[in-house]
Image: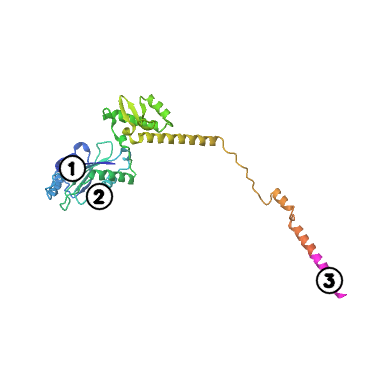
Amino acid sequence: MIAKIIKGSNFKGVVSYIFGKKKDARILVCDGLFAENKETIAGSFEAQARMNPKVTKPVGHIALAFSKEDEHRLTDRAMAGIALEYLNVMGITDTQILIVRHFDKEHPHVHIAFNRIANNGRTISDRNERIRSTRICKELTQKYGLYFANGKEQVKRHRLKEPDKTKYELYSILKFEVSRCGNWNTLITNLKKQGVDMRFKYKSGSDEVQGVIFSKNGYTFSGSKIDRRFSYSKIDAALNANRHEERQRVMNNQAAEYPTPSIPQFELRGDNDLYSGSIGLFMPANANAQADENYFEEQLKRKNKKKKQRKISL
């Protein structure tokens, strides 16, 4: 999700553009405007703008674009809700608003026309609006789980001219090769196959690597100028990570091919011969033997008692 903000002085011009014949326009939100036709909409904007004639550019125009990957999710209601939330966080409230969806491009997008003169006649602040807009777009993209593409992936490369054309070509090559190489030598070899030369930049008077430089089609760029992820330190970290993952994958494959022998497990049960036999060496084999032993002890006690009684009677 990205936003392009434009300010102007002609409401008729922006309304005519939004409702252009080839735009296949569809109104999503119309607040505070007499929406019978283009002329009445523009007239409503102009009437409120006259409340503060000191403002020379009362026209607010924002193009809010989304990624094609989110097309299936972005219903009219969803786009209107996100657009209104964007305006609210931007502080564009209590004023006339027109939100219209266009279908003339491959990606979903809406155009927002608003009056920079609020309903109370005050001017809506545009202070740091582009910085705030960029931040809010990122926040809403994350909040609603929208597709967040790298800026370079959104560029229409067939329209580029040199040296930008080569720069973006290098971006694609490096993105692929860095993700699959495990060391610098392999990376250099693979890049050469695609017509890319690479050399290190050293710190003056030492062997310490300070950067990396790539050349193709007669144009030369430092890695960080192609993209921040292609600085020397970040490429080196990526190669180390790839190498570690490869080692881990090899170890896992070896473990699967040669599993560690398992230790047999024995279950001890009461009717097991080993169990009952070993215990039987020290205990009666059954309940009947125990009863016989108890009977013998009882009889012995009785005999001893009779002997004592006889001695007393004498």
Q: Give the quarter of the image for residue 298.
A: bottom right
Front one among 233 and 271: 233
Q: Earlier in the sequence, mark 3 or mark 2?
A: 2
What's drawn in magenta, residue-wise? 298-314
Give residue 244's mark: none
| Quadrant location, the N terminus | top left
The percent position of residue 233, horizontal first and vertical second, equals: 38, 35
Q: Amino acid at mark 1?
A: Lys
Q: Tell me which numbered mark, 1 or 2, is placed earlier along the sequence.
A: 1
Is 297 left, or right, of 236 in this rendering?
right
Mark 1 or 3 closer to N-term? 1
Horizontal and vertical percent for residue 291?
76, 60
Amino acid bearing label 3:
Lys
Residues at marks 3 and 2 touching, judged by CB atoms closer than 8 Å: no
Q: Residues within 10 Å of mark 1 (few under 14, many from 20)?
A: some
Return the mark for residue 7: 1
Q: Is 307 on the left-hand or right-hand side of 166?
A: right
Quarter occupied by residue 129: top left
Residue 187 in percent (x, y) is at: 40, 29
Give the Cα distance between marks 3 and 2. Answer: 111 Å
User: Which residue is disc 3 drawn over?
Assistant: 308
Residue reaching furthest to the bottom: 313
SS for tag 2? helix
- Which residue is pictured at 19% across the width and 37% down the height? 21
* Secondary structure type for disc 1: strand
- Which residue is labeled 2 in the image? 88
Task: Determine if the magenta segment contains residue 243.
Answer: no
Q: How is the image coloured?
A: rainbow
Measure the alpha-carbon separation of dots 1 and 3: 127 Å
